Amino acid sequence: MSTPGSGPRPARPAGLGAYVTVTAAYWAFMLSDGALRMLALLHFHEEGFTATQLAWLFLLYEVAGIVTNLSAGWLAARFGLTRTLYAGLGLQIVALALLARMDPGWGVTASVAYVMGVQGLSGVAKDLSKMSSKSAVKLLAPEGALFGWVAALTGSKNAVKGLGFGLGALLLGVLGFEGALWAMAGVLAAILAGCAALMPPGLPRGSAKAKFREVFSKDPNVNRLSLARVFLFAARDAWFVVGVPVWFASALSDGTPEGAREAFFITGGFMSAWVIAYGAVQAAAPKLLRAKARGLAEVSGLAWGWAAGLAAVLAPMAAAAVVFGEGAGFAVPLALGLMGFGAVFAVNSSLHSYLILAFSSAGRVTMDVGFYYMSNAAGRLLGTVASGVSYQLGGLAGCLGCAALLAGLSALAARRLRAGDSAVG
């Protein structure tokens, strides 16, 4: 009963409990994912791996994402979203434990092959968790709240992943490689057990009628948006995966063990701050775009211009790296420029995450989201390869220039999005 003058309490949205639990599970996963990424990158850089070898470590992670997302939508439709979410968390625990068992005495070839395999398993885990969480938003969000709910999930997830980057660098310095991995596996196992025990009702259980052939979308907007997503994430990962972290770790170290450790903390701290800030902007994207005052047709028309803005940020940065050199003095201008890139990229990413759900019908949401995130993984794969190769061949300037080109291709792909071409659900 409400008190006099207070008015009735607003009704709690149906499915809110399931949304909160799914979000918490996704946060836990992304914290471990960010930490694992930074742990592997800095540890194997310290072991003497080249930029191209470091890129190889993450290739199977991205390939696994393509294959997983292609089938994850069908798996969720067939077996239910809770099962695919739990499977993602469980596989990540296995991946952490396997990496902790790696023998330091192995040669470079054996080490690269083993880490690639473990990262591939982690890639399967990540995309099962992501598809489950993003699909749940479409099914649980109240009418009119979709952009806000998906922006909150996506933004908070990336802020947590950013914390993971910092956590990974910290754990590497404090517990060492193996100790950090076992600690993360133990915490994630406890969270999985808690989610399995406490998950409220609200998510669909799946249907035996789901057919694998339905994974491939016939909606022109889903396909156009997916192509734009390929190049969008390739533009980010072309500098993010190998080039910039390795450049910071090399440029800021004086060659001593203490100097290397300090460079690790600075590199991990910057990558962490970048992803946290990026996540904050993602969460604010509906307000920044004034989405409530615009229809879907107008919002979808914004996608190409924001992608073109990424190229406009990156191209001058690449030119500056050529003109002013790539010594440690360039670290601050580079960091500021990448923060600007992050703000524009965050709006792009949040806008895309909303549009794929808006363009999907409720009956096809897991299929369309799985197909779309398959394209996301393909973009990360392209960006991972580009990051190692462009940095190896052209240094920081080549890395940033490659990213600018990929951002321009994303803008071209998004140019033809038309809300009226979809049967929006």
Image: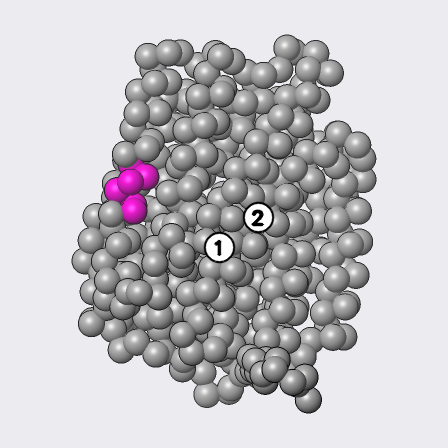
Seen in the image, is 88 located left or right of residue 68? right
Picture coordinates of residue 353, whole percent (x, y): 41, 60
Mark number for residue 283? 1
Rendered-image quadrant of the N terminus: bottom right
- Disc 2 target residue: 159
Looking at the rendered structure, the number of numbered marks drawn on it comes to 2
The residue located at (61%, 80%) in the rendering is 6
Marks 2/1: CA–CA distance = 10 Å
Under circle 1, the secondary element is helix
Give percent across and percent down for residue 238. 41, 36
Q: Magenta residues? A: 306-311
Q: Is residue 188 above or below residue 241?
A: below
Q: Position of residue 284 (x, y in %)?
A: 46, 53
Checking the image for residue 11, the label placed there is: none
Marks 2 and 1, the one that precedes in the sequence? 2
Query: Residue 8's spot in the image, x, y percent?
Result: 59, 85
Q: Answer few, some or many: residues within 10 Å of disc 2's Cα (few below 14, many 20 plus, some between 14 and 19).
A: many
